[in-house]
Image (cartoon, rainbow, N blue to C red):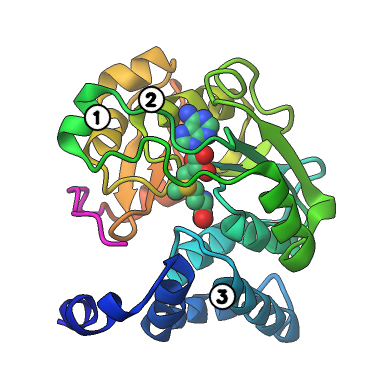
Amino acid sequence: MVRAAYVRFIRPYLSGDLARQRVKLVWHVWGYLGLLRLYRLPLAARLGVIARFLRIDWMVPHAHRPREIATLCLALGATPARPGEVVVEAGCWQGGGSAKLSIACRRLGYRLHIYDSFAGVEVMSAADRARSFDFSGSFRASADVLQRNLARFGEPDVCTIHPGWFADTLAHTPVPASVKLAYIDCDLAKGTIEVLRGVLPSLAEDGAVFSQDCHIPNVFDVLNDAVTWTALGRPPARIERLGPQLARIHVREHDGTRSREDHEGRHDARPSSRTF
Ligand SMILES: C[S@@+](CC[C@H](N)C(=O)[O-])C[C@H]1O[C@@H](n2cnc3c(N)ncnc32)[C@H](O)[C@@H]1O
């Protein structure tokens, strides 16, 4: 009902992504409360992280919600960083998520590897377009925009930027360090698989993989398709829905190894409609 009222009475008067994001912050901001449970950091540091995240929300258009980024930070803080471990963001747009993840990485002891075409979402296939909004070419921003936002709002010193299509970067060359957390946000089934090709060989034993694209039917379907996982050399993963768009991909090993969280209760895994 709140959303319907927003769409009818408020959205028509807002011009641009940033104005809409600022208004929506009124009800999404509570998603940051979860960050108070980031017990690996002292309370003052947790509050400092939330303050910096809010500044980013105010200043940089992005494509995630506070609760989603808080979920990633909590997963990252669940165990201590081992030397050399990294976080991967695949799909960064203007770097709103990157700046936040770089802050979490700085605090928790990781480097952040950011992969993007810097040419927007790859042209979607006819099959993709038949089942979803056509994102082809959207979310286009240059590497300069990303670097400026990292410098202004994030922690550029912990970041490494890998420009190029995932087909030419991750699908070709696995991440050159042990991956503690991967965040896939590219709006595309093909891109999602290319990212997994580069992430899985480097995934830490307790590493976590998240997709921000599970509201997109073809992404959700490939992640739930045993054929995908056979091609990636793994048994089928369990997809845990964590919200309208975010899901955790519980990757399995052939010897039956499961992530710690995989022993916890199963969750409903049906796709839902796009909401942002
Ligand atoms: C929804 S935006 C990412 C939003 C960002 N994570 C945030 O939180 O604001 C999707 C990004 O994926 C990138 N992208 C899509 N398809 C790609 C591909 N095949 N290779 C590389 N980058 C791609 C686009 O350039 C775009 O920046």
On the rendered structure, is 213 left or right of 50?
left
Q: Is the C-beta separation of discs 1 and 3 under 8 Å? A: no
Q: Nearer the viewer, mark 2 or mark 1?
A: 1
Q: Start and end of the magenta stretch?
A: 267-276
Residue type of the residue flagged with mark 2: Lys
Does the beta carbon at disc 2 come under 8 Å from ligand 1? yes
Residue named by callout 3: 35
Residue under label 2: 190
Where is residue 57? Give x, y as percent: 55, 73
* Front tag of 1 and 3: 1
Query: Which numbered circle lies on residue 14?
Result: none
At label 2, counting other C-alpha atoms closer than 10 Å, the crowd grade (few under 14, some 14-19, many 20 or more) is some
Q: Residue at x 59, y 53 (%)?
A: 94
Residue drawn at x 25%, y 26% is 225
Task: Write down the residue under mark 1.
Answer: 128
Locate the N terminus by quadrant: bottom left
Residue at image location 45% in from the left, 76% down from the top: 19
Look at label 1 and name its amino acid.
Asp
Callout 2–callout 1 Cβ contact below 8 Å: yes
Compared to 47, does 185 lie above or below?
Answer: above
Task: From the image, state whether disc 2 or disc 3 is nearer to you.
Answer: 2
Sequence order check: which comes first, mark 2 or mark 1?
1
* Sequence order check, earlier mark of 1 and 3: 3
Residue toward you, 97 or 86: 97
